[in-house]
Each structure stands twice: as structure tokens, then as C-alpha cells.
Image (cartoon, rainbow, N blue to C red):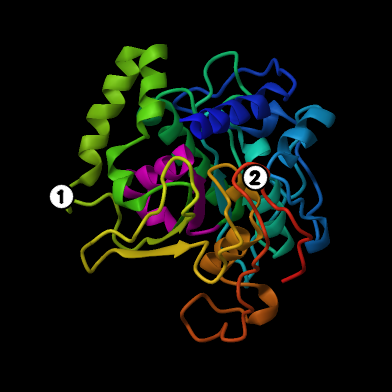
């Protein structure tokens, strides 16, 4: 429990260091907008990817709550090589900017158009997301952001990458509301075998303190998540769960038994790299996790333009293996891939 408390405190510290904003939190019926903070305008290069999980919070602290480079560029347009925009979904008590500095920069450097909205913020706490109802706020806000990004870019589908509660939100929206608009769901810090149960217990406990009615509504709604198929996965959507044996909240996970129509793969960080002991928060800046996300969404551009599994990316280098621990994260220089 000590380590779990450390993770929770660290998450709150990340958010607490961000300056307050007077912009109202998004409502449950409107898409999150980028008006809460200035957006970055230039795509970073691979050499500019930050490798500390707190770099997003530091950037917000020192840049007036602005998004880290690579995120929320409404002028970005998908290319033939990267036709699907990517939407990153943060976890409990975090926001789009302070969660995704590493993953967002890495994806932008690979040519992806990347958005990272803040969802589920309570009124007056626009920089602190994931605290409102999953079904009444976060999920409809993400669905609206999917619609906005598709309209903005002309893309038929988007890819979702979710961390912790954000993984639950992304999976929930893909299964219940936007299956025809989502190509891939990549999750970090979540157990796919338990995703249909809704948010982890500590999240529902928190929601119960904030609003017993909200907690009850979410519990009832997630029961319907399984739908007629009996699983929290949508037909036609690809799922990749990036897991770490050292995740303080999930622990080791294995691929659950699912029907044949479910396209699900579990990618364990420690397979081929015992040195990467990234935890629940530090996985957000793990070079190996970054490479697994990139591979799940199409692979490095230099290795071919096809998607995973079509034979075009046979020369893709393996994911990097860099020494990392649960609390600090990367402990060694990060080489180029």
C-alpha cells in the first residue's frame, strides 16, 4: 500500500504544480477544447522527446499551462503514411498535457497528428481531469473529441491511446459509442481482463466521496458495457494492452480468454527486457512502451508504410530496452531506436 500511496501522491503533485486556469471545465455534452491553454505549434523531432514522466507537468508549470510540443495541433493533417489521428486519454487526477509529453512528442516525431484533451474535470478544476463521472462526463467528452478531430482532419477513423482510467474510458467509448470511428485502442496501466468492470476500486471510492450518485450511475452503466457479446471489446477494433509486471495498480497481467472475433494482444514490457521495471506512472515515459505504442499504430516510418502484420515492416528494429524503475523511471541514456 505504501507504493500505491506514493503513486497517488505523485499524481496529485504533478497536477498541483500546474498553474491554475480560469477556464471552465468542459461540460459533459461538449467536446474538450484547446482554449484552456495555449497549444504547441511545432512538431518535435526524435531528439527532442523528453524521457521523464514528469516533464509534461514541468512544461506546463514553466509555460503557463501550455501543451508540451507535439500535442493538440489543430493545423495538423494526416498523411497517406499516417492516415489516422491519435487521441491520447489521461488517467485519474491528471490532464492531457502533463500525462503525454513523452508519448505525444514521440508520436508527433513519427509523423502522427496527436491530440490529448483533458476529460472528466470538475467545475473550477480544468487542469485536473478524471475526477467526474466516467459515463456522464469523461466518456461523452471523449466521444465528442473523436467527432471533432474526425471533422477537423477528414479522417474516417482515429486511434486511441489510454493510460490507467484513460484506458478504461477509451475502451468504454470504443465499445459503446464510437466503434465505427476507432481503428485501434492501445492501453497502458490497465488490465484488459478487468476492463469491463469499469474504473479501479480506488477511483470509484473517490467518486463515491465526491458524489455517491455519480459512483452508482457509473457502476450501473459499466454493467451494460459487456453488451450482447459479453465482452468489453468491439468488433472490428484492434486492441493492444501494454503491461508491466511492476505496475503498482495492475500487477502482472495476461491476455484474457476472449471470443475469436476480438483482436487483442498483450505486450509485456519485460518480454526481452527485464531491465525496464516501469510502474504505473513511469510507463508514460518508458522508451520501450513508446516503441510498443508506435508499433501498434503502424511502426516507424523509416521501416515501411504498411500497418503491423501486413509484411511491410519486417525491418522494424525491436523496441528499445533501457534501465528504468517504478518511481523515477528512466535511469540510463536513451539511445535512438
For the record, the magenta segment spans 155-183
- Checking the image for residue 247, the label placed there is none
Task: Name the residue nearer the viewer: 28 or 307.
Answer: 307
Q: Residues within 10 Å of mark 1 (few under 14, many from 20)?
A: few
Q: Secondary structure at mark 1?
A: loop
Q: Nearer the viewer, mark 1 or mark 2?
A: 2
Task: Name the residue nearer the viewer: 187 or 8.
Answer: 8
- Residue pictured at 50% horizontal, 50% vertical: 246
Is residue 27 in view from this perspective?
yes
Residue 318: image x %, image y %?
Answer: 61, 76
Q: Secondary structure at mark 2?
A: loop
Question: Is residue 128 in the magenta section?
Answer: no
Q: Residues within 10 Å of mark 2 (few under 14, many from 20)?
A: many
Q: Which residue is mark 1?
A: 228
Give the quadrant of residue 19: top right
Residue 102: image x %, image y %?
Answer: 69, 50
Q: Which residue is mark 2?
A: 100
- Residue pictured at 75% horizontal, 42% vertical: 68
Give the quadrant of residue 84: bottom right
203 to the left or right of 331: left
Task: Name the residue nearer the viewer: 218 or 197.
Answer: 197
Query: Which quadrant does the C terminus fall into?
Result: bottom right
Amino acid at each position: 500500500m505504501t507504493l500505491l500511496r506514493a503513486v497517488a501522491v505523485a499524481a496529485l503533485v504533478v497536477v498541483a504544480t500546474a498553474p491554475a486556469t480560469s477556464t471552465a471545465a468542459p461540460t459533459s455534452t461538449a467536446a474538450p477544447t484547446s482554449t484552456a491553454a495555449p497549444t504547441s505549434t511545432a512538431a518535435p523531432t526524435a531528439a527532442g522527446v523528453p524521457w521523464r514522466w514528469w516533464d509534461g507537468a514541468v512544461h506546463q508549470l514553466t509555460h503557463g499551462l501550455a501543451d508540451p510540443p507535439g500535442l493538440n495541433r489543430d493545423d495538423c493533417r494526416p498523411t497517406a503514411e499516417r492516415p489516422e489521428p491519435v487521441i491520447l486519454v489521461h488517467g485519474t487526477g491528471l490532464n492531457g498535457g502533463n500525462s503525454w509529453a513523452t508519448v505525444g512528442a514521440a508520436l508527433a516525431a513519427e509523423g502522427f497528428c496527436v491530440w490529448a484533451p483533458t476529460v472528466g474535470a470538475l467545475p473550477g478544476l480544468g487542469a485536473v481531469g478524471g475526477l467526474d463521472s466516467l459515463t456522464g462526463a469523461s466518456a461523452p467528452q471523449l466521444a465528442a473529441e473523436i467527432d471533432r478531430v474526425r471533422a477537423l482532419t477528414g479522417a474516417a477513423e482515429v486511434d486511441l491511446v489510454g493510460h490507467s482510467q484513460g484506458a478504461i474510458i477509451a475502451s468504454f467509448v470504443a465499445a459503446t459509442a464510437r466503434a465505427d470511428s476507432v481503428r485501434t485502442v492501445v492501453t497502458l496501466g490497465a488490465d484488459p481482463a478487468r476492463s469491463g468492470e469499469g474504473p479501479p476500486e480506488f477511483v470509484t471510492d473517490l467518486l463515491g466521496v465526491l458524489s455517491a450518485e455519480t459512483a452508482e450511475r457509473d457502476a450501473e452503466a459499466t454493467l451494460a458495457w459487456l453488451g450482447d457479446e459479453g465482452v468489453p471489446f468491439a468488433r472490428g477494433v484492434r486492441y493492444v494492452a501494454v503491461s508491466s509486471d511492476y505496475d503498482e495498480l495492475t500487477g502482472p497481467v495476461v491476455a484474457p480468454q476472449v471470443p475469436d472475433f476480438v483482436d487483442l494482444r498483450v505486450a509485456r514490457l519485460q518480454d526481452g527486457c527485464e531491465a525496464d521495471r516501469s510502474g504505473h506512472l513511469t510507463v508514460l515515459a518508458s522508451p520501450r512502451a513508446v516503441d510498443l505504442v508506435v508499433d501498434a499504430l503502424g511502426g516507424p516510418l523509416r521501416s515501411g508504410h504498411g500497418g503491423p502484420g501486413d509484411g511491410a515492416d519486417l525491418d522494424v528494429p525491436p523496441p528499445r530496452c533501457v534501465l528504468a524503475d517504478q518511481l523515477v523511471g528512466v535511469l540510463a541514456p536513451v539511445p535512438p531506436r
